[in-house]
Amino acid sequence: MMIKKKIIKTLTTLFTLLFVLVQNTLIAYSNDSLWPKYSNEVTAKSAFVMDANSSKVLYSLNENTKLFPASLSKIMTAIVVLDEVGENYDELVTFSYNSVTKDIDRNSVTIGASAGDQLSIKDCLYSLLLPSANDVANALAEYVAGSINDFALLMNEKAKNLGLTNTHFVNPSGLHDDNQYTTSADMAKILQCALTYPIFSQISSSVSYRHAPIRRYKNPDNSNNQVLNTTSILVPGSGYYYNGAIAGKTGHTASAGYNLAVAAKKQDMTLICVVLGCEKDKTRYQEAKSLLDFHFNNYKSLVIKDTDPRFDESISKISVDDISLIDSLNITCDEYYHITLPNNADFSDVNSKVTFQVDDIYNKYAIGSISYYLDDELVGKCTLEGKNIDVVEAIYTSYLNLSSPIADENNEDATKKTGNNNVTLSNSLIYLNNNGNIVISQTLVTVIAVTIILLLVIGIILLLYVYVFSNSNISFNKIRFKIKRKFNR
């Protein structure tokens, strides 16, 4: 009995140690060796960090948890207004009695407008985003859609068009309503959309702005006609300013807590950070700044057009029968397409997949796209543009085959031949990168590591078995007989 207990105890200890070893080894390999992970405590209820240009998600915490946006809603309000008015910023918005009274209480932020006041759309946008004026949000909603309820429908339609599935709006201001909610992931996409309007960044990053006089403050020089930016992370000299911050918005209600959505740019990288449900005003700034610092320090964003050697000028010099194709063949992608990589990775580590299925229906020159992968993770995508679709598809496909593992996404298991080389697809366990080097994917490395560890476990168990039973008087046949008799009862 004593020997049995020792065997059981030894095996239990051995398996526990091996389990911890395997778990820690795999976690360390998968998380730390390639993709740096933010390890500081985040007290916000939800947080999210992404590259605005590549859409690569770098950090997420409860990113799909529905929470109240508060005045972050005004980012979507601004987007819908800009969609509807175009660049007609001088058009006048008339404040109705409803706009200056509905959901406006003593604690609401306003510019003090009265029924009948008129301000330009530009004045209203500054007043909406800098001090977060609720009377202005209502007035803009009525100007665009005729009523606050109908404007909310436009907000929800825009959310749907952006692919947001966990966001719903009831009003343009963000005043609390149980049916007005979003997530940190959705809010990051909303801010990402807002950045495509240059005027949004121009307005939200301004320190102050003086709008036209209103009835309550008739003197144009009255300080009450000047609105100040209350998003401190965007204001130089404030205690929470972040060097590189280019756009954003705060939000706060008793139910929502303290929220922040901010975009910051350093070199070629623009990061979006969203924190929702912080307990204190300072916490949202501190945690956002810490998240931004970490990801700026550990990741890089590369302009695809400048990084992928296939987009160099030589592609425009291709000729057939000494006839230049420069007029009919002009394949490129816009400057705003990026890929996001850890600092310890290079473009040579990236593999790509080309498809001539057009996703961008708004680009009349779009002929397809390239998706870029690092260790099976999508790190960026660009839309290919060309003048002559037939010529482009025939020649550019052949050209790309010379240097990259590609295939039609509808035939991902196939292998294409280029000359004497077999080019393996990007989702294979072993493939060729853009430099022609053989790369073993992390999936295969992990499988090999687990297999080796399991073989070691089996070997150790066999050695232990031989050692224990060779140094005891226990008969294996007797043990087998007792087990058989026990189960045959």
Image (tube, rainbow, N blue to C red):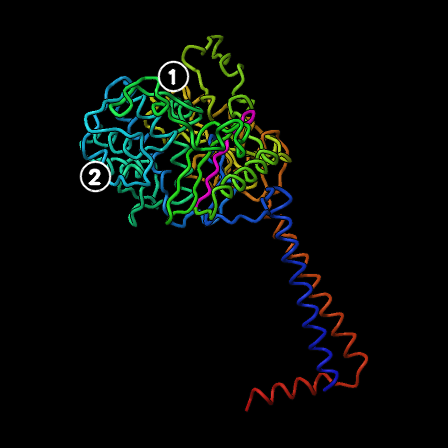
Q: Quadrant of residue 292?
A: top right
Magenta segment boundaries in residue numbering: 266-276
Q: Quadrant of the N terminus?
A: bottom right
Task: Decide if residue 452 is in sight here.
Answer: yes
Q: Is residue 113 or residue 145 the one in the foreground?
A: 113
Q: Is residue 209 or residue 453 the one in the foreground?
A: 209
Say if the magenta span includes residue 273.
Answer: yes
In primary-sequence order, the first of circles 1 and 2 is 2
Up the image or down, 40 lies above or below 190; here it is: below
Up the image or down, 429 lies above or below 326; here it is: below
Name which residue lies at 53% across and 14% down: 313
Q: Which residue is mark 1?
A: 387
Q: Are marks 1 and 2 in contact (CB under 8 Å)?
A: no
Question: Of tags 1 and 2, which is closer to the observer?
Answer: 2
Going by the image, does 38 lie left or right of 389? right
Q: Residues within 10 Å of mark 2 (few under 14, many from 20)?
A: some
Tell me which amino acid carries mark 1: Lys
Q: Is residue 51 or residue 387 the one in the foreground?
A: 51
Up the image or down, 248 lies above or below 323; here it is: below
Predominant SS along the magenta part: strand
Q: Which residue is mark 2?
A: 149
